[in-house]
Image (cartoon, rainbow, N blue to C red):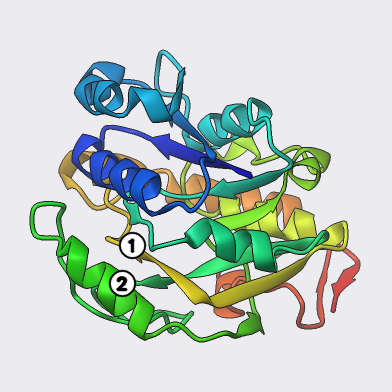
Amino acid sequence: MISIIIPTYRNPEYLDLCLKSCIEQQANKNEIIVAVDGFIDESKEVLKKHKEHISILDLGKNQGMQTALNLGVMNATNEKIFIVNDDNVFCKDFDLDIENNLKEKSVLTLNQIEPEGPGIFNFPVKDLGRTPEEFKYDKFIKYEQSIRKNELTIDGGIFPFAMYKKYYMAVGGFDVMYKSPFICDWDFFLKLDLIGLGFTRSHNAHLYHFGSTATKNGKEGDRFKATETPAAQVFMYKWGIPPQLFKNNNHNPKNGLIIKGIKFE
C-alpha cells in the first residue's frame, strides 16, 4: 500500500480527472491525500464527489505547493509515498509498478506522456487532449499499455515520483523558503542525493501530464512566473550554482559537479 499525495490550487477540472483516474486505475485501495492550498470552495464539488475515497487537508489560505506537500506527507500513514501533480492522469495498475520497482534508497519516477515535446527527459509525446474536456480517457489507457517497456533507467528526479516517507522527512521535505513552485524540486532532489538516494525512471507505467496548468493560465501564470527569479536567487545562495546548470544536466546531480565543496558523482 502507498500514500498518494496530490497538492492542488484552483484547478478543479483537472483535479476531478486526476482523482477519477487514480481511484479507477489503482490495483489496491491506497491512501489518497488531497492537500488543498487555499480557495477550497472552488474545489468543494469535486472533493464531495470523491469523498469516500480520499482524505482532505485544507490549508485554509494559499501557503504554496511546498507547504501543501510537506503537510500531506506528514499525514501519510504508509511508508511508501507517491507525489503527483493535480493535472496528472493515472494509468492502469500504476501502483503495482511502484510496489514492484521502488527500492529502499531510491526515488522512482514514472514515465509521462505529454501532448507536446520532447523535453529534456524525452517523454513519449501523444496529444490526447490539452484540457479535461478534450481528454481522450479510453484512448490514453489503451495507448499507454501499448508503449510499456519492462525497463528501468537511471536518470534524474522529476514529478511525479515515489519514495520512502522516512527519507522525505530526513531531509526536511521541500524548502518553504522558495515561495515558488519553480526550482524547489531541484533543491529537494539535491538534498536526497546528499543522503545517498539514487534516481530511477520506470518505463513500464506512464501518467498523462497536461503540463504545468496552474503556471500557464492567465494572471495566475504571471503570478507564479514572478516568483521564478527570487527562487533562483535562493537556490544560488544555498548551493553556489545557478539553477540552470542543474536543469541542463537533466535534474541529475550525479555528474561530477562540485557544489559548495561537495562532489556529486
Q: Which residue is mark 2?
A: 114
What residue appears at the point 44 percent right and 31 percent down from the top-left corner? 34
Q: Picture quarter containing residue 202?
A: bottom right
Does the rendering let one see residue 7?
yes
Outermost residue to the top:
60
Which amino acid, by three-letter code, is at mark 2?
Glu
Image side of residue 20 versus residue 186, left or right: left
Image side of residue 238 versus residue 19, left or right: right
Image side of residue 149 versus residue 240, left or right: left
What residue appears at the point 57 percent right and 40 percent down from the top-left corner? 178
Q: Which residue is mark 1?
A: 209
Q: Work out whether 158 lies above or below 225.
A: below
The location of residue 232, given as percent across then percent down, is 55, 54
The location of residue 88, given as percent across then percent down, is 35, 55
- Within 10 Å of disc 2 (Cα), the crowding (few <14, some 14-19, many 20+) is many
What residue appears at the point 36 percent right and 21 percent down from the top-left corner? 38
Q: Work out whether 114 lies above or below 105.
A: below
Dot 2: element: loop
Sequence-first disc among 1 and 2: 2
Q: Work out whether 146 lies above or below 75.
A: below
Residue sitting nearer the eye, 46 or 31: 31
Which amino acid, by three-letter code, is at mark 1?
His
The location of residue 135, given as percent across then percent down, is 15, 61
Q: Picture quarter containing residue 8?
A: top left
Image quadrant for the N terminus?
top right
Image quadrant for the C terminus?
bottom right
Does the rendering let one see residue 245?
no
Kindly check if marks 1 and 2 are in contact, taking CB atoms under 8 A apart as contact.
yes
